[in-house]
Amino acid sequence: MDLPLKQWIAQLANGISPASLAQAQSDWLVHLLVSPAKQAELSASALRKSLAWWLALVSSEHDAQADEAMARQDRRFAHKEWAEPPFDAMARAFLSAQQWWEEATHGVRGVSKHHEDQVAFVARQWLDMLSPSNFVATNPEVLKRTLTTGGANLANGFVNWARDAVTVAGNGKARGVEDFLPGQAVALTPGKVVMRNELAELIQYEPATATVLREPVFIVPAWIMKFYILDLTPQDSLVKYLIENGHTVFIVSWRNPRSEQAGLGMEDYVRRGVLDSLATIRSLYPKTGIHAAGYCLGGTLLAIAAALPECRDVLRTLTLFAAQTDFSEPGELGLFMDESQVAFLEDLMTENGYLDGRRMAGAFQLINSKDLVWSKLVHEYLMGATTPMTALRAWNADATRMPARMHAEYLRHLYLRNDLAEGRFCCTSRDPVDLSRIKVPMFAVATERDHVSPWKSVYRVHRLVDSDIDFVLTSGGHNVGIVNPPQGPAAHAAASYRQMHHAAHQAPAEPDDWLAGAQRFQGSWWPAWTHWLREHSSGETAARAVRSVTIDGRIVPAPGAYVRES
């Protein structure tokens, strides 16, 4: 009797639990009502901000410094038209309201940190929706474009909106993604599938040099993404970069699960994805250590596997790209993690046996709605422009599903309870996974503007493993910071990174202390990683072609079959 109602509510609420949000709002409101001192403080703040706004409005002198500060504070108001009245007054009023709500939602005595963050998040969503930049009459850039084009921008914007509405209503794909299909425009590095089971394919890439380092590189991407984020176009492919620098490369391509895979759990992903792949690589390169690397939750999965007895004496090194092992500070994704929210998602997944990837994409958009939602509204619907499709944007639209059991397990055990870091997470046996059993050299990469794996959370790996660690903090976000080629048209001119090596348990306890002492280098971190891999390899050997392995009676070239599943 419960499930039909809960599934209907889940569809209506886009997968976010109304009960969770209601608990947070009531916690904040009740404690605010019994805090007259906080109320007085907020009233005084509102009065000060109102007076400051009014004085700026009636002042006869133009304050250029205030305009610059406003542009720095919010890039929505960076264009010069926002410095002219009455739009400067609108922008300042909006920014003052933002500051006031930040004060109102924080520092209320008795409110839990989780509820405080949720209330602040909801307030930010409403403010971003009501920003003067989102409306024709209050956006000077839109008004100027409307006058110069005779309203053509609004007509074009309506066409853009209608196109997107039809796409969403029909569960279609974004315009332009057909130009970036795997094996045609992206994921072009030559190779073959050398192993397939019901959950994953293992791809080996053809060598590009006469000699290669003896130890192969094995990459595990997250199961919530298609693997070709690391093999986009030839200009920004990490896989291509590795083989051109003398590495033998293997990568996992996860299957896009359907209802029949609903019962697959975390242990299945460890066994069938990581351990089966490692066994295949060892059969091809016996008695050879493996450089293992994992991206995002693929790195978390790889760390779990690396701590198991099955991986003893298998790995030569371990590399983690934007991967958390301690989820005590999960960042803004933690806003969606409490018992009510997880139970809500479990009910939502009951119908089909999986979570549609578009639900996760929607959560990521909400976290950064100012840039991912409202900036699109202004650019495409009000200005009438079209955003060109790129390989990275097409990949981002290539959503994947998650089996119900596995998704619930990692939400509960990792995000909600932090069982892995606290020594309670069990996998493949009744004994908890002990990350301190990881003793191989590690290379850990975090990104400065990561909404998915905050760098300070990634840094916590230092206290969990018994390894020497080279920790790298690179510019960019969760994707752009990792897909960061050192040269060519896809290279980021302003890219930089910080790097520091520490012996086991010798790194500063706090991330900020590490940051204060880490040296900054210009450019991509890729060369630093390949140099580190070479230092931890045992020399070179002659390159050999990928062995032809028949899968279901035929040889399957890269990028394989699973990546094409929708």
Image: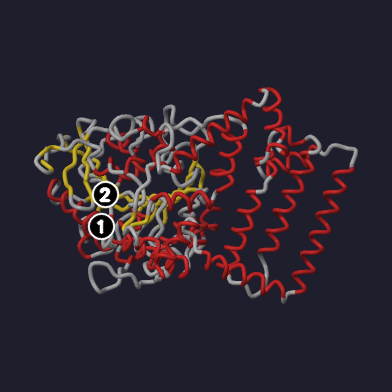
Mark 1 touches mark 2? (CB < 8 Å) = yes
Q: For residue 189, what is the image quadrant?
A: top left
Secondary structure under badge 2?
loop
Left or right, 564 with respect to 157, comes to left
| Pointer 1 local density, CA inside 10 Å: few below 14, some 14–19, many at least 20 | some
Left or right, 83 with respect to 167, comes to right
Distance between the Cα atoms at labels 1 and 2? 10 Å
The residue pinned by badge 1 equals 261
Which x, y percent locates residue 428?
23, 67
The residue pinned by badge 2 equals 255
From the viewer's perspective, is the residue at label 1 or at label 2 nearer? 1
Dot 2 amino acid type: Arg
Against 455, residue 241 (above or below) is above
Against 445, residue 158 (above or below) is above
Left or right, 341 with respect to 26, comes to left
Q: For residue 158, what is the image quadrant?
A: top right
Q: For residue 185, what is the image quadrant?
A: top left
Q: Which of 564 and 560 lies nearest the eye of the viewer?
A: 564
What residue is drawn where x is 70% and y is 63%?
104
Which x, y percent locates residue 193?
19, 41
Which x, y percent locates residue 335?
52, 61
What residue is drawn where x is 33% and y is 53%?
298
Secondary structure under badge 1?
helix
Which x, y percent locates residue 299?
35, 54
Q: Earlier in the sequence, mark 1 or mark 2?
A: 2
